[in-house]
Image: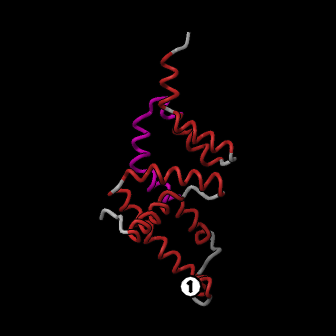
Amino acid sequence: MDDPGSEVMIQDNCLLLVILAIGLVFNNHLIASAAGSLLVLKLTKLYSLLNIFERRATDIGLLFLLIAVLTPFALDRVGIKEIWLTFKSLAGILAVIGGIIAAYLCGQGMILLELQPEVVVGLVIGTVIGVSLLKGIPVGPLAAAGVTALLLNIIGSGKR
């Protein structure tokens, strides 16, 4: 006799299972690890930890991303000379401009996520596809929210 409780459990966790499978099929360990970790937390009923992740994971993730980017400064691989050279090359100047644009877009993305949280589903699906099929990196949801905000403003559909 089939256990109806197990069928409900599979249905309740279907999306995380699909994301886990996509990560495994496309050999993307970050996607698979994230989905698997969330699935374990959900199955073990650690909802308080899930709620903390929901509220603070973006900040924590950005902190670790910034630490990774700034580590060469701490290891003295980048100094004043390299910073000065940045402003003397076209690539360096374009990198500064790119950083400004990316920071602005991500800020707009955060506003979009606050005003229209329903776009999160599309951002997650798009990020999973981009990471799995296009070998992108999963820093995408925030950047994707910024690009989405820009696109919505261009076509005039922004709700701001």
Residue at the far top in the pictured view: 1
Considering depth in this image, is 151 or 47 the residue closer to the camera? 151
Report if residue 56 lies within the magenta region: yes
Considering depth in this image, is 95 or 86 the residue closer to the camera? 95
Q: Is 123 positioned to the left or the right of 130 in the image?
A: left
Residue 8, horizontal then vertical, whole percent: 48, 24
Considering depth in this image, is 155 or 36 the residue closer to the camera? 155
Q: What kind of element bears circle 1?
A: helix
Image quadrant assignment for residue 74? bottom right
Residue 90, horizontal then vertical, whole percent: 61, 87
For the residue carrying disc 1, how many other residues have a C-alpha within 10 Å: few (<14), some (14-19), or many (20+)?
some
Q: Assign the magenta stretch its main secondary structure.
A: helix
Q: Residue at x 44, y 69 (%)?
A: 105
Q: Residue at x 47, y 60 (%)?
A: 142
Q: Is 116 positioned to the left or the right of 83 in the image?
A: left
Quadrant for the C terminus, please: bottom left
Residue 46, horizontal then vertical, whole percent: 44, 33
- Say which residue label 1 marks: 93
Residue at the far front in the pictured view: 155
Image quadrant assignment for residue 88? bottom right
Residue type for callout 1: Ile
Q: Residue at x 41, y 35 (%)?
A: 47
- Tell me where the magenta segment starts and ends, as one range: 40-64
Report if residue 139 lies within the magenta region: no
